[in-house]
Image: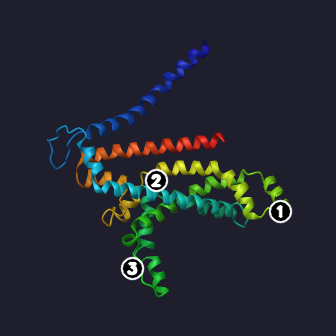
Amino acid sequence: MATQHARAAARLMISPSVILLLAWMIIPLGMTLYFSTLRYNLLMPGSNPFVGWENYQYFLTDPAFMTALVNTLLLVGGVLIITVIGGILLGMLLDQPMWGQGIVRILVIAPFFVMPTVSALVWKNMFMNPVNGLFAHLANFLGLQPFDFLAQAPLLSIIGIVSWQWLPFATLILLTAMQSLDQEQLEAAEMDGAGAFSRFIHITLPHLSRAVTVVILIQTIFLLSVFAEILVTTNGGPGNASTNLTYLVYAESLLRFDVGTGSAGGVVAIVLANIVAIFLMRMIGKNLDT
């Protein structure tokens, strides 16, 4: 009886927080769904007729949508490949005994704590500037023509910037997984004549599989909403070359002042993100069961 009263009291005490969190999520989502069914343009105030699925049809048939979708997939896939492979290599390096190991680990993890806007500005002005950037000075020193990264390879440049931000996270997770590996297995394999590459393929890599799936899941959720780096560096250009779904929704809502179409794009982005999240959760579930 006392247990039932304790449970009821616990539910009563946490209910305000739960209600606040539900309102925090449901009210913006409900307003987005509502605005997505209206012809709501900020340049035409007072005229907001109900149009049903018209905004969704316009957004999905816009040529910029497919470009943004492909760019989003390329951005997520490119960053995941770089961070997972780079994280494994850096994790193996940092797992070795060395002088100043603690300082090196702090320096490797440091970029993860830099704000996206700040890191994008640093890369744009200090490294990728075709006149005064570090890469331009290096090209001039070698007698080469400076390369304008943000104009000639905008999406690849953004992939590099975002990868630099997320590489420390992947390194930290994978390094922790490596340190939990039983060293007796590696020593036994070495005594049996297995080389370093064979030990990595057959022992280390399978041990890292769960950590890799966790890195992929967490990073994918955040990478689907990359925005600040694009806004600061390329503004989605040239043309739509670096526009992803998040930036396309921003452009529709706040650059073209079409709140209705922007809201429809936001709903589409939410649906696609949930599909990806469900797929990744199932993949992780299967990985954890094996």
Q: Secondary structure at mark 1?
A: loop
Find disc 1 in the rendering and name its residue. Answer: 193
Q: CA distance from mark 1 to mark 3?
A: 54 Å
Q: Kindly give the residue lying farthest to the top in the view shown.
A: 1
Of the numbered discs 3 and 2, the one sitting upstream in the chain is 3
Find disc 3 in the rendering and name its residue. Answer: 131
Residue 160 in the image: state x and y as whole percent: 48, 65
Q: CA distance from mark 1 to mark 2?
A: 42 Å
Kind of residue indicated by mark 1? Gly
From the viewer's perspective, is the residue at label 1 or at label 2 nearer? 1
Bin the neighbour count of mark 2 within 10 Å (Cα to Cα): few under 14, some 14-19, many 20 and up.
some
Instruction: Say whether residue 240 is left or right of residue 146.
Output: left
Q: Secondary structure at mark 2?
A: helix
Up-down: is 30 above or below 248?
above
Q: Secondary structure at mark 3?
A: loop
Quadrant including the C terminus: top right
Find disc 2 in the rendering and name its residue. Answer: 223
Kind of residue indicated by mark 2? Leu
Of the numbered discs 1 and 2, the one sitting upstream in the chain is 1
**Based on the displayed image, in which of its 4 quarters is residue 104 positioned?**
bottom right
